[in-house]
Amino acid sequence: MSLSAMEIAGRACHTRLGACGRQRCEPGWRLAPGWARGLVDYDLWFVWAGRGRMILEAGEIELSAGTCLWMQPGRRYEAEQDPAQRLGVNFIHFDLCAAWSGLPLSAFAPPFEVWRTPEVEFTDLVMRRVIALREETGTAPTAAEDLLGALLQTLAHEHSAAETSPPGGLDRHHRGIVERIAAQVRESPAEAGGVDELARAAGYSVDHFSRVFLKVTGVRPQDYVINAKIERARQLLLESDFTIGAVAEAVGFRNIFFFSRQFRQRTGLTPTQFRRGA
């Protein structure tokens, strides 16, 4: 059993890992009605590729990359795939146990049954790691169970945040795209292009991208890029022995004088003053 307690839907608990795997569904595959009748634990079911549809108690849903299902015993799950776009699926069976007694939680209501996460790559990566850890030992290692617990908490938080977001907000799809672009800018500010290149990567016109980006981040995209470059420059000035010119070039400024001016506008110090002060 995992040693690290977590809280999901207000209940302190541990995960207890069961069977898990990753598969590309074969041609002609379908999830037959009899499968759900044999479900005795929870099953985190995640689509990482392909398309299809699933019938639940509440009706029919479309399956596509990012679809998460917290499957529960005693409920209906029937699915089929698009023959031209076969499903890729991760699945992890698990139980939730009370934090201190280790007994299965009673009367627990999962925070969601269906959720379309905007973090497709992250969710897939974490599930793949859980599966790999499980297969490495043939048992249920604490690290895998803790990692699964953290993922469940993350998905539950995403779902809760979406449920409580004010009406009329941005579509999650568009918000996810902007957040992905913003993360790429923060990770590699020197490689961030102009607003036109960012908009093209997002699949938007420049004007539409700028409006959506500002609404999501509170900052215009051109200012966001410069802020990311200055933040990385601050780190390099503290951590490295690069010259000021080398720092400017490393974060994507071709002109050292423009770099110094931008740095001073945003920090109140020149790069040299910042380094000496630090």
Image (spheres, rainbow, N blue to C red):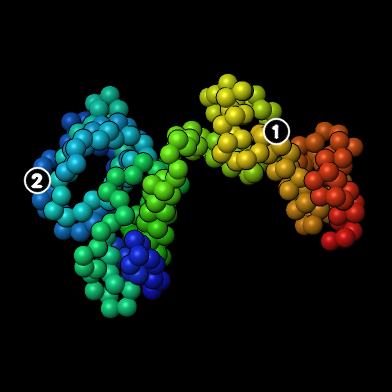
Tell me the number on the disc at residue 34.
2
Q: Three-letter amino acid code at disc 2?
A: Gly
- Check the image and report above or below for 198 versus 39: above
Quadrant where the image shows the C terminus = bottom right
Residue ID at (16%, 58%): 40
241 left or right of 211 in image? right
Q: Position of residue 33 (x, y in %)?
A: 10, 42
Q: Closer to the camera: disc 1 or disc 2? A: 1
Dot 1 lies on which element? helix
- Residue 97, picture quadrant: bottom left
Q: Is residue 178 above or below residue 274?
A: above
Q: Please name whichever residue, 216 or 167, is drawn nearer the observer in this view of the structure.
A: 167
In percent of the image, x 89 and y 48: which residue is there?
Answer: 270
- Please say if the residues under marks 1 and 2 sit with CB atoms less than 8 Å apart: no
Left or right, 196 with reference to 253 = left
Query: Looking at the rendered structure, which numbered label has been put on residue 222?
Result: 1
Quadrant in the rendering for residue 34: top left
Give the residue furthest to the bottom: 101
Specify whether 129 is left or right of 84.
right
